[in-house]
Image: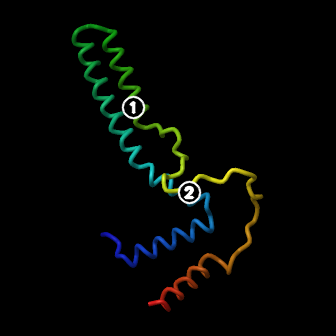
Amino acid sequence: MPLSEHEQRLLEQMERALSADDPKFANAMRGSRHGAGGARRRLVVGIAAVVVGLVLLVIGVSTSQIWLGAGGFIVMLAGTIWAFSPARGTDAKPAGQPPAASGPRPPSGPKPRRGGSFMERMEQRWDRRRNQW
């Protein structure tokens, strides 16, 4: 069941809050969602290679040409590895994000809390939103 417009806005606001609280986790989750198209393509190409390899293997066995059967097996193996291995560069940022600024990174350590806990901030945002309507 699709989300209503109000629920979509709430979800987007929660995603922004998560990005502000834990950017590493948010980027990891965002990357996995945007990489689904590439993974699907790799799976389809891998399955096609497995089918072609199987056909070559059967033809090689039926005609007693061992080299053709061995080649078919290698194509099947390569297709399987291709389909189930992650694409290189999956850590790349989505196209909509600007490149990271080059320069020294800020020291990583405990970050100061802004305005209380995550739930308190969410409640404050909820109250502000309700007052706007």
Q: Position of residue 106 (x, y in %)?
A: 75, 58
Q: In the rendered structure, which amino acid carries the disc numbered 2?
A: Asn
The label number, if any, that marks residue 59 in the structure image: none
Residue at image location 53% in from the left, 51% down from the top = 93
Residue linked to disc 1: 80
For the residues labelled 1 and 2, the Cα–Cα distance comes to 29 Å
Specify the amino acid type for callout 1.
Answer: Thr
Q: Mark 1 vs mark 2: give the one in front.
A: 2
**Relative side of 77 to 104, left or right:** left
Residue 29 image offset from top left, x and y in percent: 52, 57
Spot occupied by residue 84 in the image (x, y as percentages of width and height) = 43, 38
Q: Position of residue 5 (x, y in %)?
A: 36, 76
Question: Left or right of 13: which side holds 23?
Answer: right
Q: Is residue 117 left or right of residue 128?
A: right
Q: How is the image coloured?
A: rainbow
What residue is pinned by disc 2? 27
Please, is residue 96 above or below residue 16 in the view? above
**Residue 2 in the image: above or below residue 85:** below
Determine whether the residue tagged by mark 2 lies in a helix, strand or loop. helix
Q: Is residue 125 left or right of residue 3?
A: right
Q: Quadrant of residue 7?
A: bottom left
Quadrant housing the C terminus: bottom left
Q: Earlier in the sequence, mark 1 or mark 2?
A: 2
